[in-house]
Image: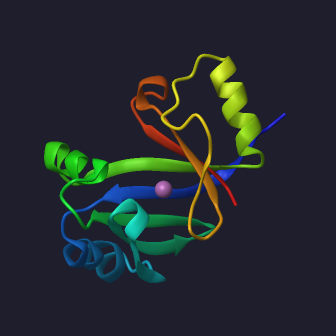
Amino acid sequence: MPHVKNINHVAIVVDDMEKSLHFWRDSLGIPLHEVRDVPAEKSQVAFLPLAGAEIELVQPTTPDSGLAKYLAKRGAGMHHVCLEVDDIDGMLAELKQKGIRLINEEARTAADGKRYAFIHPESASGVLVELYQV
Ligand code: CO
């Protein structure tokens, strides 16, 4: 039976990366690992690893992505929580069977080979949940 292993990352959508880094890196003192462009998601992501998990600051780089629309509508803030699972296909099948609304019915593969899928907030206490299989 597939299960959740840990929290992989918490993602925060931001409208000004430097201003956000001033808080998360410079004021809280969480070391910045890297800032990377993710063209597939039309965004720039800052990775701040923390005790086996990560804070990710995500800023849209074009005005037409889903993330950009989210930012325009709600402003900067919490975007999603990512849970690492040992078997993403098995977990998606099980969630589907339990009537959970999925945004991605099938796992997608990121540029770095990680497989991921999103669960709709409607089924998850209002929180956008991402599943990862590393
Ligand atoms: Co994520």
Q: Is residue 46 visible?
A: yes
Looking at this view, is 129 or 39 the one in front?
Answer: 39
Looking at this view, is 84 or 21 the one in front?
Answer: 84
- Horizontal relation, residue 87 to residue 68: left or right: right
Task: Write the residue at 44% across / 27% down.
Answer: 125
The image quadrant where one finds the C terminus is: bottom right
Residue 34, horizontal then vertical, whole percent:
45, 83
How are the colours assigned in the image? rainbow
Is residue 101 placed above or below 37 in the rendered structure?
above
User: Where is residue 19, by image quadrant?
Assistant: bottom left
- Horizontal relation, residue 86 to residue 50: left or right: right
Residue 47, horizontal then vertical, whole percent:
46, 73
The image quadrant where one finds the N terminus is: top right
Residue 20, horizontal then vertical, whole percent:
25, 71
Looking at this view, is 57 or 64 the one in front?
Answer: 64
In this view, the residue farthest toward the right is: 1
